[in-house]
Amino acid sequence: MLPLARALAEAAMSVKTCAQCGNLDSQDPCGVCTDAERDRSIICVVESVGDLWALERARVHGGLYHVLGGTLSPLSGTGPEDLHVGALLDRVRDGRVSEVILALSATVDGAATAHWLTDRLAGTSARVTRVAQGVPIGGALDVLDDGTLATALRARR
C-alpha cells in the first residue's frame, strides 16, 4: 500500500491544469495544446477532462479542446462564473479559430450551456456546431426514449 500511496502523492504533485484549455497534464501548456500536428482552427468544447480523453481514445478529433469544467445548472447553483469560459472566448476572438464544436451532454443543462455559449460566440467569425445526437449504433428504436427519437428524427441527414 505504501508504494501506491507514494505514487498517488507524486501524481497529485505533478499534475497541472493547462492554462489554455483546462486539460490535466504534467506540463502547462498540455501535450494536446503543444502538439504541432493539431488543427488549431478547430476547438472542441467539452464538459470535463474525462470527455476530452474519451474523444482522444476514439481518435475522432484532430483539433484543440477546451474544458468548461461543467455545465450551467441553476438547480445545482452552477452559473457562468463557475465555468472556464473566459479563456475560450479569448481563444476564439483572436480570429484564428474557424469552428467551435460543442460536444456537451444531451441533457437539459448541456443544451442550456450550448445555447448560452452559442450566444456568446455569435459576434465572432467562428462557426459554432454541435455533435450529433440521436439513435446510437446498435440501438433499437423501441427502447429509446421519446426525446432521443424526436432529436434523431429532427437531425436526420
Image (tube, rainbow, N blue to C red):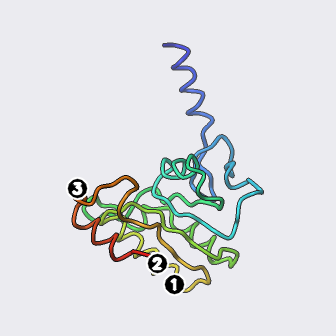
**90, 106: nearer the viewer:** 106
Please provide percent x and percent y for residue 17. Answer: 59, 48
The residue at which mark 3 appears reads as 143
Q: Is residue 100 above or below residue 12?
A: below
Label 1: which secondary element: loop
The amino acid type found where label 1 is placed reads Ala
- Asked if disc 2 and disc 1 are in contact, CB closer than 8 Å, the reply is yes
Res. 118 mark = 2
22 on left or right of 96: left
Task: Identify the residue at horizontal 59%, vertical 83% (top origin).
Answer: 124
- Asked if disc 2 and disc 3 are in contact, CB closer than 8 Å, the reply is no
Mark 3–mark 1 distance (CA, rounded to whole Å): 37 Å
Q: Quadrant of the C terminus?
A: bottom left
The residue at which mark 1 appears reads as 122
Please provide percent x and percent y for residue 58. Answer: 55, 49
Task: Identify the residue at horizontal 22%, vertical 61% (top origin).
Answer: 145
The amino acid type found where label 2 is placed reads Thr
Q: Is residue 40 above or below residue 4?
A: below
Q: What crowding class fits label 2: few (fewer than 14 Cα within 10 Å), some (14-19), or many (20 or more)? A: some
The amino acid type found where label 3 is placed reads Val
111 on left or right of 27: left
Please provide percent x and percent y for residue 156. Answer: 40, 74
Q: Is residue 109 above or below residue 157?
A: above
Mark 2–mark 3 distance (CA, rounded to whole Å): 32 Å
For marks 2 and 3, give the one nearer the viewer. Answer: 3
7 on left or right of 111: right
**116, 102: nearer the viewer:** 102
**153, 69: nearer the viewer:** 153
Label 2: which secondary element: helix
